[in-house]
Image (spheres, grey):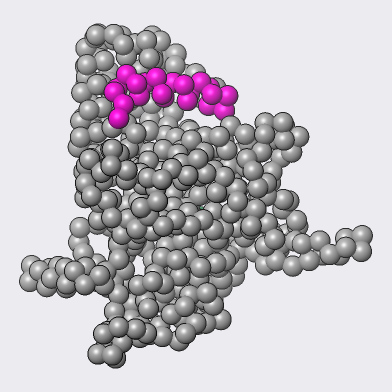
Amino acid sequence: MSLLQKIQHQRHDFTHRAFDRHIRLGVTGLSGSGKTAFITSLVYQLTQGDHPANLPFFDVVREQRYLGGKLSAQLPDMPRFPLEQNLQYLLQASPQWPPSTVGSSRLGLQLRYKATTGLRARLQSHSELSLDIIDYPGEWLLDLPLMEMSYQQWCEFSWQLFNREHRAALAQPFLQQLQDADLANDGELYVQQLTDSYKQLLQQYHDLPGAYLNQPGRLLVPGPLAGAPMLQLFPLLPQQAAQNTALVAKLTQHYDSYCKHVIKPFYRRYFAALDRQVILVDCLSALNAGYAATQELRQALRLILQSFNYGPSSLLSRLFKPQISKVLFAATKADHTTPEQHKALTLLLQQLLQQPLKHSQYQAATTEAMAIAAIRSSNSGFVQLDGLAQPCISGSTLQHEAVTYFPGDVPTNLPTPALFAQHQFAFIPLAPLPWQEPEPLPHVRMDHVLQFILGDKLR
Ligand code: GDP
């Protein structure tokens, strides 16, 4: 893009924002929660799926006022969300899930519609809304609490976490290495060697179902920060971090730089500009992984929600003036359950979020929780069992084996350890349903999602 084009684009951008014709939508969730599938579906529904039969609860489409959406020119400042590549995976004869995005990406859309009210409806044949979708890892929001902790407090927090039942065994080799560590040695090679061991541990936790709280967020996905000294960072044992030694001093310095040069700028540059936010949560995988996993998911969500706490004394309002007015919490992969369980899945999500959402400081933004499947992988129906109609779903496993079964009930409350001891939840992953263009991309409740996020702006 030439400088002139860039300036024109920015002016267009500014005019749209000034007249409230521009929405910056953040999409986040912990790794594997469904961000890639969600954005692929959202954009496809807005550009190709705009039929009332496909999006019955999206007012602008149902009222036949939607004139279509198209991708807009990409600004060169951020990686582009790989929409076209993702669709290719879904269009294969044996469809596959697209690979998860890593780091942050962006996609811009221009939406056209006929306004119903106001000056716009009278003066213009059509109105436009530009939508910027910004995808970023939920793990980056897990970094916010670091800003209110010292390096030593972070070490205490981390080792409390690593000592938990589902994490302790994996932490053993790193624990051993730290117990033998030379705290007077702050040499480059030595610090890097210990950082590499911690990275290895984080990678193992990342691959362990139910270990959500992995900090710092950029150690595994450094992006442009790769090689920066502040990423030489790991939690020493709490009793070590309390000592006054060269290694402790160096790690404390790196920790403070990480807070100042990574966390703060992320909130100032990206987060502060968001108008609306979708937070995706995979509750079913946490149930599959057991009690410790559901507890850790709850704790991670509580930390993530701190980023939406805009009370006058909150850390964020001291950093900038947040403007997020709507937050949607979506329990993803609802198609791994039968439809009559979706209500329970929504209640479970609400329970996971309940405590923080009750606080009045979150009421600045309108929030909603719902159970969705961005890209449907099952069909639902009934089988006759002992003369009774039993709900079931049918689809294909990730190995493309056809299956029909009842996946079980979703609890409406967080189950107790006793229940987990008796019952193994098994919501098994399924492959996307076969799909060909121009058929609509099958989903569950993406029309409700669109209505919540965009409905008021498309009147
Ligand atoms: P990300 O890491 O947050 O980008 O997550 P992805 O979108 O890559 O999703 C991770 C995995 O979850 C996918 O590979 C699928 O197996 C599964 N998944 C995501 N969305 C859906 C959905 O709508 N339905 C079903 N059945 N599975 C999904």
Q: Is residue 215 left or right of residue 231?
A: right
Task: Please tell me whether the stretch drawn in magenta is mainly helix, strand or loop.
Answer: helix
* Residue 422 on the magenta span: no
Q: Is residue 25 above or below residue 267?
A: below
Q: Which residue is depicted at the point 44% across and 16% down?
A: 175
The number of callouts visible is: 0
- Pick the quarter of the image with the N terminus: bottom left
The one of 32 and 149 positioned closer to us in this rendering: 149
Find the residue positioned furthest to the left: 4
Is residue 26 positioned above or below 62 on the image?
A: above
Q: Is residue 157 magenta?
A: yes
Instruction: Name the quadrant containing residue 21.
Output: bottom left
Asked which quadrant contains residue 134, the reply is bottom left
Of residues 204 and 420, the one drawn nearer to the viewer in this rendering? 420
Determine the residue positioned at 50% across, 71% down.
447
Q: Which residues are magenta?
A: 148-168
Q: Is residue 353 left or right of residue 339?
A: left
